[in-house]
Amino acid sequence: MEDSEYVSSLPDDFYSSDYCASKLISYFSDRTDLEKEKPFFAYLPFSAPHWPLQAPIESVERYKGIYSDGPDALRLRRLERLKALGLVKPDIVPHEVIVTQHEPPEWASMTEAERANSARAMETYAGMVSRMDANIGRVLDYLRQTGEYDNTYIFFMSDNGAEGASYEAAPIMGDEIVAHIDKYYDNSLDNIGRRNSFVWYGPRWAQAATAPSRLYKMFSTQGGCRVPLVLKPAKSTTTDKSAGNRITDAFCTVMDFLPTILDLAGLEHPGAMYRGRQIAPLRGRSWKFFLDATSNDAGSGALRKGRYKITYVPMPKGPQRWELFDIIADPGETVDISAEKSDIFEELLNLWDTYKEEVGVVGLAGELHAGFKSDGVAVTDEFEDTGRWIKFIGRKDVPPEFVSTIPI
């Protein structure tokens, strides 16, 4: 979509990562001289590497054979690399891999064909990531060529932990999804990653990505909500170049982005109303002081205070109750200390209740009722176009089902 309208046609060689980067570069280059004198804000949200896993063949082939020893071997290699880079402590205890019934079996228990297909899906995923990386490089190269790079703050982060869902194992929906894919897509080995294939890589590869943390996207564990952030500050005014690149373990949240950007731009938050619409209150804190110093589920929940974190993971991936972890000493969330630290546990539960009331949290698994089957399983269409309402913004011919959705 562009300007709230669906694009009517795409070129034969269309690939979203290439196209989105090119579109952003065109927005930059099409600015007038007056516009180029003003600050800009740009947001480049890639679809990659979300499923379906698809990438140009040349991007996939470079990874051929790299993942043939399976996700457990990859997980160990990555853990050792994290230790070598100083990103995790040498004595860290990683959380065990968690899978449930009907999800992919261990590598050794798969058939040769199953292993080949699974490895190919991971090769495609890697191809998607490297293609995205190359396109980020194109954008940065443009900013260097125009002389804007040094004076631009650049943030890169994931929106959640690795996507580890196995939709073939989903209750009620699983068989229907598989039947739909078998009917309309070609997931043969040689075709995996092409435009008419539709694959994902599942929970074992995902936990190779999130280790040593626990689980992955959709869960409030560290593997689901702790993500990497790469920040390039604007050029320092100091002549001291000794600091160089660095790794910091300072705690921040995605809620800090808005106050940080407003602070950097010298703007005030509008408060409770904006252009006649009620908006959510500002949360988080600005990183500007820190940056200046250094350059000079549904159903799942979590809350952190200092070194302690409460986590709620629904069955079957978790115990479907609140747990307490010391994230500093136990980043893998392996030892529940809620009984040992009952006073801290109770304090964080009370803070969760306050947060829940303030922001309108829908609820945790076991608390939800509306829209669920009698067996407690939510039924949703993972393939539904949930953004259909967007194209009706500012138009008069709004279908009745979208009237309450369109913002004023």
Image (cartoon, helix red, strand yellow):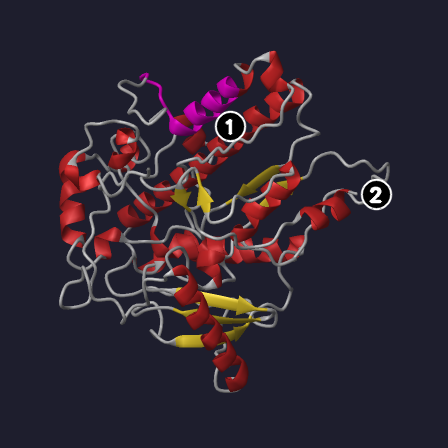
Classify mark 2: residues with Cα within 10 Å, few (<14), some (14-19) or many (20+). few
Mark 2 element type: loop
- Using the rendered image of the protein, determine whether residue 97 is visible from the camera's viewpoint: no
Mark 1 element type: helix
Q: Which residue is mark 2?
A: 242
> Within the image, what quadrant is residue 366 found in?
bottom left
Say whether residue 201 is left or right of residue 168: right
Q: Earlier in the sequence, mark 2 or mark 1?
A: 1
The stretch in magenta equals 11-27
Numbered mark located on residue 135 in the image: 1
For this rendering, which residue is in front, 380 or 336?
380
Q: As shown in the figure, which amino acid type bears the numbered disc 1?
A: Asn
For this rendering, which residue is in front, 197 or 141?
141
**Overall secondary structure of the magenta stretch?**
helix
In x, y percent, where is residue 160? 45, 51
| Position of 311 relative to 263 (above/below) | below
Classify mark 1: residues with Cα within 10 Å, few (<14), some (14-19) or many (20+). some
| Position of 80 relative to 54 (above/below) | below
Q: Residue at x 51, y 48 (%)?
A: 271
Say whether residue 42 is left or right of residue 15: right
CA–CA distance in space, label 2 to label 1: 30 Å
- Using the rendered image of the protein, determine whether residue 241 is visible from the camera's viewpoint: yes
Say whether residue 154 is left or right of residue 122: right
